[in-house]
Image: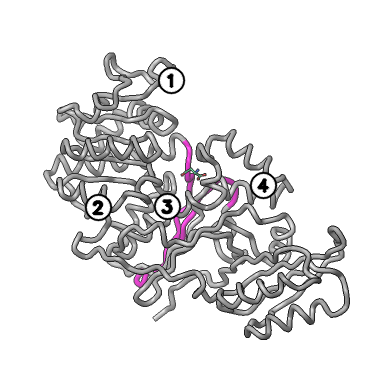
Amino acid sequence: MKVIHIGILGLGTVGTGIARLLTENRRLITSRLGAVLHIKRAADLDIQRDRGVGFEKGVLTTDPLAVVNDPEIQIVLEMIGGEKIAKTLILKAIANGKHVVTANKALLAAHGNALFKAASDKGVSIAFEPSVGGCMPIIKTLRESLVGNQILSIKGILNGTCNYILSEITSKGASFEDALASAQANGFAEADPTLDVEGHDTAHKLSILAAIAYGMRINLADIYVEGISRITPLDIEFARQSGYHIKLLAITKRAGGSVEARVHPTMIPFSNPLSNVHGAMNAVTISGDAIGDMMLYGHGAGMMPTASAAISDVIDIARDILTGASPRVPLLSFQRQHIKKIPIRPIEELVTHYYIRFSAMDQPGVLAKIAGILGEYAISIMSVHQIEQKLNGAVPIFMLTHEAEEKKIRSALSRIASLDVITDTPMFIRIEEKNSEFSQP
Ligand code: HSE
């Protein structure tokens, strides 16, 4: 039977999971592929540790070049993470004519355009299913299953750490710090958890999804990013009582000749299935002009779910190799000459509903002052709520607005913040009222 040799760079959680899955499901995979996937070399700084996977003698090495320079290896799996070394090794593997599978969303977000160009020039694949949404086949869905659709929007919960923290605060009243520590202990937080909490990990993933959805160059720099660190239990509780959950959402929408691409805490009504995705789970909804709406849900991180996505990429490439069709699917979904620079709309141009929380002195006339300034900016209030709970003599006032332009919200809030009756910077959260961009023809 034909053998396809593969090499693994990095035997951390995901790299080990890949070796384990290939070993445990060897027969199954062989019977589906019609060839044997053989781990020829696997590199890691630590090759002494027992990972619970039996490697053949001579497979393990501390030298990553022994993987990317091995003439028999046809597919290299980059599971190191980080930007510098991973990029160098991927470029070396490509130069040596090898196909690459990577889970490295940060690398693709920062250097994807150059890496994909290098791979296309060489006629090899870079596959990246495990880089977004763990086990969910979101890349395959966009690149292949929905190839006949115009993608209208993608909305996703793509960071398990943030979703876990928000869920723990909502359901158990946990503190932010305890919930984050628990996410770290469970192994799904990034090595630097500010990447999770401040929304950057989600933005990395969104930059990849937007590129393959619309045929645009990867553009991380113009994605608006806001994390969850300013969300308080007060916001979560008010949202819940008003029929919303707060989620860190990645949102991209087609918007004429430009696109929206933004990551921020978002209030989502209970009627939206994303509102009910709890714990470390990930989910993504896609609106397309032919499909209407669809949703994927699953483990967005973890050893075996992410390994499953990596193996699906390996098998896709192996099938291409076996049929001589490599690479069958354009790497970024569109033919190279059709990939354009599509501008991302500045966040100031966003028009949506807003939740605003003020911290104000409990005095006559305060509400009138706030409402007066909002009125000057044509911001229409939908509801107002004040609770008795005093914090340093101030009370929280919650508002929901009708649709307003973000530029006006920002200007109005900065004027309100300077009133002497306001005791803290006003907090606002965007609301995603509509569940879908699809309208029935
Ligand atoms: N840190 C990421 C998360 C891991 O929490 O979802 C998967 O990319």
- The local crowd at label 4, few if under 14, some if 14 to 19, many if 20 or more residues have their Cα within 10 Å, is many
Q: Earlier in the sequence, mark 4 or mark 2?
A: 4
Q: Nearer the viewer, mark 4 or mark 3?
A: 3
Q: Nearer the viewer, mark 2 or mark 1?
A: 2
Q: Earlier in the sequence, mark 4 or mark 3?
A: 4
User: In whole angstroms, how far apart are the C-alphas of marks 3 and 1?
Assistant: 30 Å
Left or right: 267 in relation to 286:
right
Question: For mark 4, what is the residue?
Answer: 168
Quick one: 16 or 420, which is closer to the camera? 420
| Element type at mark 3 | helix
Question: For mark 2, what is the residue?
Answer: 331
User: In whole angstroms, how far apart are the C-alphas of marks 1 and 4?
Assistant: 32 Å
Task: Please name the predominant secondary structure of the magenta segment in the image.
Answer: strand
Question: For mark 3, what is the residue?
Answer: 205
Amino acid type of disc 4?
Glu
Q: Which residues are magenta?
A: 278-302
Question: For mark 1, what is the residue?
Answer: 52
Image spot of residue 36 (x, y percent): 22, 29
| Quadrant of the snapshot with the C terminus | bottom left
Amino acid type of disc 1?
Gly
Quick one: 311 or 131, which is closer to the camera? 131
Q: Earlier in the sequence, mark 1 or mark 4?
A: 1
Image spot of residue 159 (x, y percent): 51, 49
Residue name at image x 25 percent, y 34 percent: 31
Residue name at image x 57 percent, y 71 percent: 433
Q: Relative to 225, say whether 414 is above or below.
A: below
User: In whole angstroms, how far apart are the C-alphas of marks 3 and 2?
Assistant: 16 Å
Amino acid type of disc 3?
Lys
- The local crowd at label 1, few if under 14, some if 14 to 19, many if 20 or more residues have their Cα within 10 Å, is few
| 3 and 2 marks in contact (CB < 8 Å) | no
